[in-house]
Image (cartoon, rainbow, N blue to C red):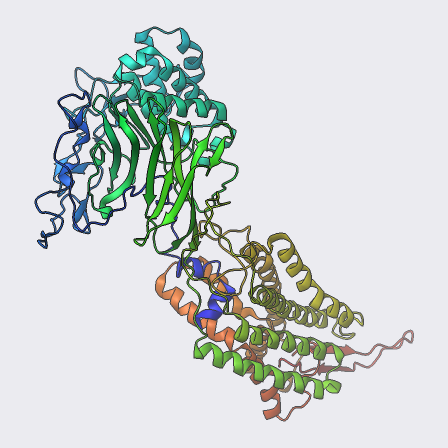
Amino acid sequence: MDHFLLLIFTAAVFEQTWCQNNLTYSTISIIECYGTFTLQTTTQRSTTTAPLNTSTSTFDTSALQTTTQRCTTTAPLNTTTTKPNPVCENKGTLLNGICLCPDDWTGTTCNISNFCPEQSSTQTSEFTFPKTVLGQFASSVERCPSHTPNAGFPKASALCNRSTHLFDPPNTLDCGLTLDTINNDLSEATQAEVLLLASSTQILTSIPERLTAHNITNAVKITNILLSRDETAQSTDIAVSAVATVSQLLSAGHGMYFSVNQTAINELTQALQKLSLREKSNPLLVQPNMAVLSLMGQTPIRQVQLTSFKGQSDTFLPDRIKLDTTQAEISKDNIDLQMKVNFSEDFDKDVGFVLYDSDQFFQTKSFQPSLDTKRRVISANLQENLGFVDIEFAVTPSVDSTLSLNDFACVFWSYTKNDWSPEGCTKAMNPSGHAVCSCQPKKIKNANFAILMTFDINYQYSEALHWISLTGCALSVLGLSVTAGYQIKTRKSRGGSPTLLMVNICMSMTVFYLLFIFGINNPVQHLSVAKLSDQNIVPESDHHKYPDEGPCTAFTALLQYFLLATFTWNTLYGINVFLLFKNGVSGTPPWFPKVSLAIGWALPAVIVGISLGSTYSVKDPLGYRQEEFCWLASLDHKQKFSMGKPMFWGFLLPLMLMLLSNMAILLHFSHNICRTNPNLNRSRKTPLKKKILSSFSLAVILGLSWVTGYILIITHETNLKLILSVVFCLLNTTQGVQILILFTLRPLLNSNPAFLDSVRVSNIGFHRKSFSLWKNKKPESNESYRSTESELA
């Protein structure tokens, strides 16, 4: 029964039932240049407690060791001692014995505050700032007035200080200042003016919804100038404002970057690489969408390992990021991002990393994503190029049950090609299920790396038809066959037009039921198993598409055709009834049967042809049909109902037009047979019961029970939806049985073989009066009345 409902009104029912909890892609962490970069298996959390060469290094280890509370070294790796799971506080969630904290809390049990409390206007500050996570900027509640160019933008911003847990002195915005003005004035500004312009740029890019391609281009150029000035190396405030601006730009809509100057973007990413290698820069600049980390090299090292821990959100926070110069065994369940750089010889120069939460700055032509998946990018930068550097990284896809890994490619960004390149990288899948990459980019000391993944959607294939659907459809096939035979046998008693219409209705509906029984389930099912290729090739998209195979597309086209044909013939039957009412004496026009044959079979073919021709291809059959079962496609890549899919304009729309016309014909029919003619005597009046049965019979043959499907689309009350679903399925799986009872068994039981006579003006008494043509001769009044029983009476 549920299959029949899914077949017809997938547009609403499938979206709100099967897909309600399984089709959200926006929160999927798919990539792509982050993950577990050391692949040793471990059964417990551990970390190195020794400082990072604090005796000789200027590297601020206090900032980078804040996550050691997540790890423990209280037991050796081979111990069998297990610790009880911690009790997570402040809405923290437990994952494999580790508390994942919300952004505003940290600690082993999420019991340490990680925010600045709300600050109201005071004598020293005229601005109010909301509660804000440490290290991030807060925008003031006060806004620029409506008559200024920056109407609606915050008047000020303030950095939540990680040391004091209080807001720094606010940076104010001139409400008449624009990004165009800043871009023009910045090159000649003094150091004090540079700081003001940097903070103003950060405020003017703080609302992602108001970022346009022009604004992004200006902000990118401004940030390039800021990062290239010597003042940035001397001033942490300028660097923090610049990084915050870049982080905010990554929140802009993806489509905006198609029009942004790619040369300016490339210059920005290279300027950020240089920033990560500046000796006097802050070793840890972290904003929600990006982070810049530095390791000042004075003590020789052989490797450096970057780790970003998981939280409840997928944003970057200072307490979740850590650098190690020795390999630390860390629980892979708690890892969000990790990379290891191995040197062939002792290296005592600076090492820098830049983390991007998305690939907005890397607009590729070879890889076109369609699933709204996230691709993180990480840049590894060396102050000096060595003969051999091995960069290892890997990832376990963090996706929900709707997606599964199909294949992936290890790549780096080529500034000469302005695209991803797999050269110098190899890939493998280890037994633990990690996607492993190893890259040795030749003569490249600064490179942006990513893992581009392609996924399969885990389709929930429909099960075998329920016995209720099978029984109803089988009985309908039998009933329609008997009805068609009865119509042909008794055709002389009713004329050609009604017989032609009824037989074609039975034929199209019978074929549809048979196709539904034997062809609705897709016989080819794609299992969710990774199909790793031997070659490291950039995939075309993050959605792996299977070429068409099997008979599912053919069954979809046939189901669409014969279902549309059924409703077309239903509508023609209704038009025939209307013409009989309109031309009560002469009946239907002689041309009507031939026109009906042309329209009844040709119109559905035109609609199916347009649907196939505009949406189907062998490489991507899902543009036309669904994968779960053989019916028209209705959902877009976000698994939301789309009016651009053939389900809407190739079925629902033409069906709605037919049903509306059929409803109008039924109302016209019911009105005419129910009104009382005062000139008829009591013996000629039709009983009310017979009138109601006539209207019901016409409603059945016109297929008006399908209107309940449209009511389902707009219904949100759960119980009513369930009731309507049951009613819809029962009425439409047994429509053939209803036709058998009303149009074959009932007239036979009434011993009225002419019951299916033409639909000539059911229950309407024709008023006949004679007139004399002779002049001055008064004719004798001689009136008579005739009532013709219709096939629906």
Of residues 730 and 587, the one drawn nearer to the viewer in this rendering: 730
Of residues 263 and 245, the one drawn nearer to the viewer in this rendering: 263
Q: Quadrant of the N terminus?
A: bottom left
Does residue 333 appear left or right of residue 433 in this picture? left
Q: Position of residue 716 (x, y in %)?
A: 39, 58
- Which picture quadrant has residue 662? bottom right
Q: Quadrant of the C terminus?
A: bottom right
Q: Position of residue 332 (x, y in %)?
A: 24, 47
Numbered marks: total = 0
The residue lying at 24 percent from left, 18 percent from top is 170
Q: Position of residue 584 (x, y in %)?
A: 74, 74
In the displayed structure, 424 sits above or below 662; it is above
Does residue 250 appear left or right of residue 779 in this picture? left
The residue lying at 67 percent from left, 90 percent from top is 753
In the displayed structure, 507 sits above or below 363; it is below
> Would you say residue 154 is visible in this rendering?
no
Q: Position of residue 236 (x, y in %)?
A: 26, 17
- Which picture quadrant has residue 411? top left
In the displayed structure, 597 sits above or below 14; it is below
- Which picture quadrant has residue 322? top left
Of residues 348 and 464, the one drawn nearer to the viewer in this rendering: 348
| Most distant residue in the right direction | 775
> Would you say residue 500 is visible in this rendering?
yes
